[in-house]
Image: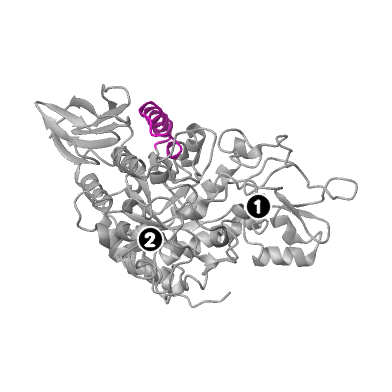
Amino acid sequence: MSQQTPAAPADDSAVATVAQHRDWWRDAVIYQVYPRSFADSNGDGMGDLEGVRSRLPYLRDLGVDAVWLSPFYASPQADAGYDVADYRAVDPMFGNLLDADALIRDAHELGLRIIVDLVPNHSSDQHEWFKRALAEGPGSPLRERYHFRPGKGENGELPPNDWESIFGGPAWTRVEDGEWYLHLFAPEQPDFNWEHPAVGDEFRSILRFWLDMGVDGFRIDVAHGLVKADGLPDLGSHDQLKLLGNDVMPFFDQDGVHAVYRQWRVVLDEYAGERIFVAEAWTPTVERTANYVRPDELHQAFNFQYLGTEWDAKELRAVIDRTLEAMRPVGAPATWVLSNHDVTRHATRFANPPGLGTQIRTAGDRELGLRRARAATLLMLALPGSAYVYQGEELGLPDVVDLPDEVRQDPAFFRGAGQDGFRDGCRVPIPWTREGSSYGFGSGGSWLPQPSTWAELSVEAQTGVPGSTLELYRSALSARRSQPDLGAGDAVEWLRAPEGVVAFRRGEFVCVANTTGESVTIPSHGRVLLASGEVTEADGEAKLPADTTVWWTTA
């Protein structure tokens, strides 16, 4: 696929001056943009790169340090762009390479860094390699770059092993010539064979292509999945999906992946400007996650254990301790995240009873969910390390749990098993204004319908309104920058607190979160910096309402 290319690579000096302090990623707040749902510049109902570019000043003013863009590569969109046909081209629905170049340059001028998604576990079935592998038939050298195998059974009619797709059904699809190929996700997403040297060579070239364009880093999709166990052994379980993230799997978190990332790190370190890698790595324990962020590998790894933790003081304290203890020996920053494009928004998760997981189909108690979400955000932003914000959470957006079946596009929804298939609810385009066909998202509607109640959740409706969720985020991010004891670090000092309350000190900063459904009275800790709810103080004591977090400074 040919596209116009920028006239010259981005200047390394421009990248290097985006942030003034070293190791910016150790305390960065990184904002995830899901491009199709952020801003639509041409009125076709689909977000695009020019739309993102037009809203960069909003992100600067919000107070984030970097922007992570979900995939915008050329793709048939079988899985919302995570099925890549050409890693060096922009899909026409999002624009072209000139648009990507302009976005990167504008972001740098605004003091923002750009992180792009990279999908190395699998390609699209429309990738040139895979199309040639199918056309050339058994014995084709191109088939060695994927996992093609003969089937079991008398006539090869059974899959080569018992692995199940994350999206439901077998992880194998049979082609017309009788061979089968592996796809841990949709059939349109065949897995690469990372034992083949051509695969590694290709991805190191792809890294250089985007680094030359000026990107500041890569979020690595399915970073734990590249290498499979020797011989592709049977798993022997018919409830494999229940084991994900909880047990050892022959297709996930194999030790061989670390050699890949050590090679990648050599490439990255050739470039100025402190570029980074971020791993999406679902592992059984946070200790296994720490293996990905050793000094010669990746810089950060998502903390899915924290994301899946209930709004409970005891559980939160335990996962915070485990995370900090696991990251300390490898010298990597902890990361904290509450929402992303694959899970129900935390304003809805916390609106429901505990124990329902991270994909929830019921709206729950909206008022309760928002109150807890605001409190959880202040707790997250007070922790040492880096934090991630998913687009729209700063508006307090809930998941859209009542989308009609006919508009859904999550591939798992149509396979009848596997993931719940309701990820579209967190991907609905965000509202910018009170009015308009898509509340300011674009001029021509939106690819998923937005609730009418979102008018009052829009950026316009919340800007400048004291106590709004948007202003809470802006204030929190401003305070996080200005308070010397916030941001980077590897420890907290736990303080005595009533049951159901999380309290810790970081230098002259104190954070207290009441996770209970009742108000609590505790000693005041100085001057209140910020609170997610109405805190009253008298005679050296503070009364925290239910589900409320407060920040103090003792300075």
Q: Sequence order check: which comes first, mark 1 or mark 2?
A: 1
Q: From where the camera sits, is residue 331 visible? A: yes
Q: Amino acid at mark 2?
A: Ser
Q: Main secondary structure of the magenta part?
A: helix
Neighbour tally class for label 2: few under 14, some 14-19, many 20 plus, Cα within 10 Å: few
Whether residue 325 is in magenta: the answer is yes
The residue under label 2 is 452
Residue depicted at x 45% and y 59%:
428
**Which quarter of the rendered picture does the N terminus lie within?**
bottom right
Relative side of 135 to 286, left or right: right
Q: Is residue 226 above or below residue 407?
A: above
Q: Is residue 289 above or below residue 155?
A: above
Q: Is residue 318 above or below residue 187?
A: above
The residue under label 1 is 415
Q: How is the image coloured?
A: one colour
- Given residues 492 and 267, the one toward you in this image is 492
Where is residue 300, by image quadrant? top left
Q: Amino acid at mark 1?
A: Arg
- Given residues 80 and 277, the one toward you in this image is 80
Where is residue 239, by image quadrant? top right
Residue depicted at x 33% and y 44%:
367
Q: Which residues are magenta?
A: 306-331
Relative side of 433 to 294, left or right: left
Q: Is residue 299 above or below residue 429?
A: above
Q: Position of residue 477 (x, y in %)?
A: 25, 48
**Which quarter of the rendered picture does the C terminus lie within?**
top left
Label 1 to label 2, Cα distance in Å?
A: 30 Å
Residue depicted at x 42% and y 37%:
306
Residue depth check, mark 1 versus mark 2: number of the one nearer the observer: 2
Looking at the rendered structure, the secondary structure element under dot 2 is helix
